[in-house]
Image (tube, rainbow, N blue to C red):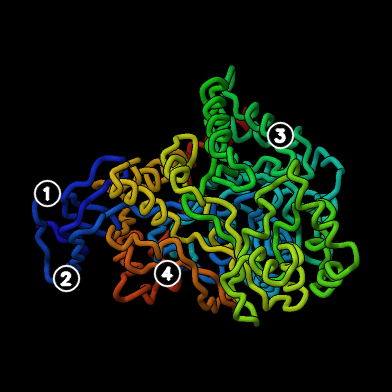
Amino acid sequence: MQHFDIIIRNGIYFDGSGADGAAREIGIVGGRVAAVSELPLEASDSTRIIDAKGRWVCPGFIEPHSHYDAEIIAAPELAESVRHGVTTVMTGICSISMVCAEPEDCSDLFTRVEAVPRDQVLPLLEKMKSWRSPAEFRSFFEGHPLGPNLVPFIGHSDIRVRAMGLKRSVSKVKPTADEMQAMEGMLHEALDEGFAGLSTMTTKLDRMDGDRAWAAPLPSTFARWSEYRRLHSILRRRGRILQSAPDAIGKINIVAFFLSAMGWFRKTLKMTLLTVLDLKSMPRLHVLGPLGGWMANTFLRANLRWQFLPAPFVIYAYGLDFNSFGELADARILRDVKNPEDMYAEAAKPGFRDIMRRNMKAMLSAGLWHREFADAWVVKCPDQSLVGKNFSEIGREQGKDAIDAFLDLALEHKDALRWGVQFAGERTHVMRKLCKNKQVHVGFADSGAHLENMASYNFPLCMLKYMRDAELEGQPVLTPGQTIHRLTGELADWYDIDAGYIRQGDRADVVIVNPEGLGPEVFEMEDAEFPAFGMTRLVNRNDNAVDAVLINGRVAYTKDDGLAPELGKQTGFGRFLPVRGSAESVLGTAQQATA
């Protein structure tokens, strides 16, 4: 008789392949799926039984775009993702990794861009960062008590700072031959160690932290295309992935990305780009982006996917601290001054409001934000009568326009004014189409970043809700099996990682979903304490949707008991997950060196 550590009974089983669900019992032994049976499995006295009646038993979800680089060091359980069924996360995105550069450099690259407190991250890195190479990074995380599995990218800004020094890396100087070779060497080592690929950044909207290069764009944005091309060639030869973002303002360099991805007369460069959303600022992006991707994949023989967030994209801000003010050419000073008091002093100057109005109307340079205060609402304010109203309504009541209403309240209340705006995802029918579109990958969630501003930790549940609602309305888009495949097996296959399936022999990363729990609360956010960084953050807490989460065959979370007490404290849950073929890549590199 087979002894099982865990048996999952009475559930509807989805293996991650896209197949329809079926009634099956799942037996788990030693962290692996040992049996998938139509017949009842026999339990021993020590077998844990999980009753999944009326539930979907799915592979653990994959998040291909997180910024957990700091949190995974401080609080490796990654609780807000695990509680929503995410069992594998990718880090080192958007050119920012914490692998090769010094602790202060890593902090300055990361904290302002991702809106995570520098006074928490820098001491953390100074205390914990004992690694300065991809091999040492892997060694550290193989001994770290991970919650979800970790699949890292190496960031171009990270290796550029290490090779050139911080100040040279954010200047227009071209790297020397030795500096370029150093970057190439770090990239090769990362790929040898099983990193998924390289991340770069070409849009200059994000700005650095610290005293040495305050408000400078990320180092990756200073690279010439010839520098990108040399790094791309390594990825192409070794079959690894480029993650990047075209210029959000100019947008012209998307052509260069498409040509780099081209597979005519050479090996294809796999590429994943930010982003396709149903943006209010670009209402046809949901058509043009996938169309461009289809043309590149069809006529240029590319292998390109856009990243997509299958959830409403809602941002909260405090007073004048709003990242998208960086998109305003003349009013960018609100983002570039370091002292918050100076920011408010700038906004109080005569003539600033005219500058703001002129910039708000400059739609030729539109970025992610649609620049409409009439579409932004008050979340918290000392004047409770204003909560829930948008700035246009407040302006009408006070005899002023929406911009004046906003600036008056921000100058009066500063950070005590909390307000929200939805950038994307307002049109449900468009979101449903994008959930199905084969030119996109789901999972652009930014987990671990913008802690007080946004929360999409539960993006897989949002997608399941979109598809289930469509089916209940008699207008099905994807079956449950197809939806789960998009969140699991499809991503695992494209990124070439050992995840995304729960067939016999697979590692037992499992989430048990209650479809009846996919209600409107899935789209809601709330504040919760985050002790690791001594702050509160926005989270998703739709606890009726997930009954249990298993990582490596161990119960990491249940609805009734919450997070396992040993999660994030003991090894044995998630692990460093090298891409498949890493050993072959090491052998190939050694052979090239010998030749």
What residue sits 63% from the left and 34% below the top?
234
Residue at mark 4 to residue at mark 3: CA–CA distance: 39 Å
Instruction: Tell me which amino acid carries mark 1.
Output: Glu
Residue 188 % position (x, y): 62, 41
Q: Which mark is residue 46?
A: 2
Few, some or many residues within 10 Å of mark 4 (<14, 14–19, 20+):
many
Residue 213 appears in the picture as rendered: yes
Question: How much space separates mark 1 and mark 3, taking CA atoms?
Answer: 53 Å
| Left or right, 234 with reference to 506 | right
Q: Nearer the viewer, residue 305 or 220?
A: 305
- Label 4 residue SS: loop
Three-letter code for the amino acid on which mark 3 is drawn: Asn
Which numbered disc, 4 or 3, marks the residue closer to the eye?
4
Residue carrying label 3: 253
N-terminal of the pair, mark 2 or mark 3, is 2
Name the residue that disc number 4 marks: 541
Q: Amino acid at mark 2?
A: Ser
Between the residue at mark 1 and the residue at mark 2, the CA separation in whole angstroms equals: 22 Å
Residue marked by disc 1 = 38
Q: Identify the residue at horizontal 78%, vertical 66% (top origin).
A: 210
For label 1, the crowd category at 10 Å Cα-Cα, with few meaning under 14, some 14 to 19 and many 20 or more, is few
Q: From mark 2 to mark 3, how far is it between C-alphas? A: 59 Å
Residue at (59% x, 57% y) in the render: 136
Which sits earlier in the primary sequence, circle 2 or circle 4?
Answer: 2
Measured as percent of width and height from the top left, residue 43 is found at 11, 64
Residue 146, x across and y down, in percent: 46, 64
Q: Earlier in the sequence, mark 4 or mark 3?
A: 3
